[in-house]
Image (cartoon, rainbow, N blue to C red):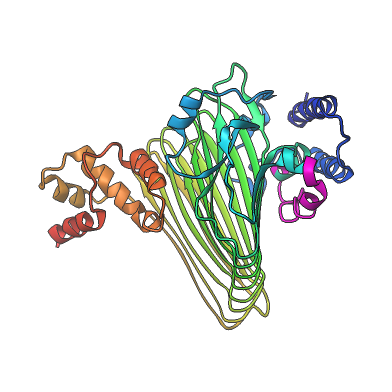
Amino acid sequence: MSATHTFLNRLEERITHLRESSTEPEPSWIAARRQAGTARFEALGFPTKRDEAWKYTDVRRISEGDFALAQNADFSKTTAATLGLPLEAIRLSFVDGVFSSDLSDMTDLPQGLGVEPLSQALKTNHESVGGSLGRLSGVEFSPFAALNTAFTDEGAVIRIGPGVVVEKPIVIQFFSRANAQPVMSHPRVLIEAGARSQATVIEHYVGEEEAANFTNVAGEALLERGAILEHYILQEAPLGDLHIGSLHIAQDRDSRFTSFNINLGGALVRNDLVADLNGEGAEANYYGLFFAQDRQHVDNHTLVNHNAPHTFSNENYKGILDDRARGVFNGKVIVKRDSQKIEAHQSNANLLLSDRAEIDTKPELEIYADDVKCSHGATTGQLDEEAVFALRTRGIDEQTARGLLTLAFAGEVMDKVTLEPVAERVERAVAGKLPERFNLSDLVDVATADQA
């Protein structure tokens, strides 16, 4: 049996289960999109390294896997509290892709804010959801987007009304369990930010240490005029998990989108981030950090489309690779014809902590307008041994010195992070448990001065 048919058989099982468990027929538009996703996935199959967009990433661990579908959301509240971020937040939680009301907290939402699981939104107002779901991330984007569309039945729907300022962060929590048989999930995330609204949304992926599941998530964010959205992906999946994710953003005039894409876990990880700047004054900021060790593989593909004049984008991705880990970065900026007076900057810097670690980086610019200001660049290097020595002369042991300098390398991205619990997770992953809080900038200045 082919790999695609194995997944399609699981799809048939899910559709049968949905029909048997519901008293209402599935909306016709969902059935049509599900059919389109199925047909597209069946026609394309899984990508191979012969496909340009996947030339550095082998997905056979997914295509050859036998993944079941989770039937419940049983999970310890104690474990969830330990794994989750210690934040006062609005929470929408899923266990292996199944919504958990016990682990969620959507009480006392401010007026004008809607937060609910997709399964509930489809029951209460499916026509409204249907107008936005799949508008940006359709079946044509990739085989995994087609597969996600075919399985669409659960996920998160966040709607922020015009002028609404959400003070608390909204956390979409995805827990992965250590199951007897690995499972897969295909969650959908839809964010609609009304004119002049403001919010922070965090997608957090984490799980039990022995988990080895497959998550295939597709996200869409629509920002109306003047909307401000700060979006985090904190990916701390267990080292046996396989993670494919995409996020598409459409921005109207004067909107501002800021992405923090932080990848610390997972055996195989692929992220696609696409922003369409459709109105004058729209701004997109991409901050990325990926830290991989052992044999982890992390692939980040980003794209910014400057579709209107007077738009701005800035991208800064940092990669830290140890042992036999492999990283991939492909960042692309396209300036459309007549999109004059735009500004676009892109940077990818990588730190290799091992001679066996590998990075493939490809920054790209396509410019079809004349009056623009654009820059891009990529660098790869290793820790400065003289800086390590300089810190050791101040009584810092070698392991801590290397951890601090590695964390300092990430500082240009992490300085932008305003959520302390997120910063602490990065610090712990990159540098281990430090004896105290260090002023990284001062340490780097000291180490540099000693070399002069």
Report how many numbered discs are placed on residues in the image: 0
Q: Quadrant where the N terminus lies?
A: top right
x and y percentages locating residue 294 in the rendered image: 42, 32
Looking at the image, the residue that sits furthest to the bottom is 371
Residue at 81% across, 39% down: 38
Judge whether residue 131 is colored magenta.
Answer: yes
Q: Quadrant of residue 60?
A: top right
Q: Foreground residue, 362 or 18?
A: 18
Q: Quadrant where the C terminus lies?
A: bottom left
Q: Foreground residue, 112 or 150?
A: 112
| Direction from residue 353 to residue 99 in the image, left or right | right
Q: Foreground residue, 303 or 203?
A: 203
x and y percentages locating residue 63 in the rendered image: 67, 31
x and y percentages locating residue 402 in the rendered image: 25, 43
Q: Is residue 389 above or below residue 15?
A: below
Q: Is residue 225 visible?
A: yes
Residue at 34% across, 43% down: 427
Q: Is residue 69 above or below residue 328?
A: above
Boundaries of the magenta span: 123-144
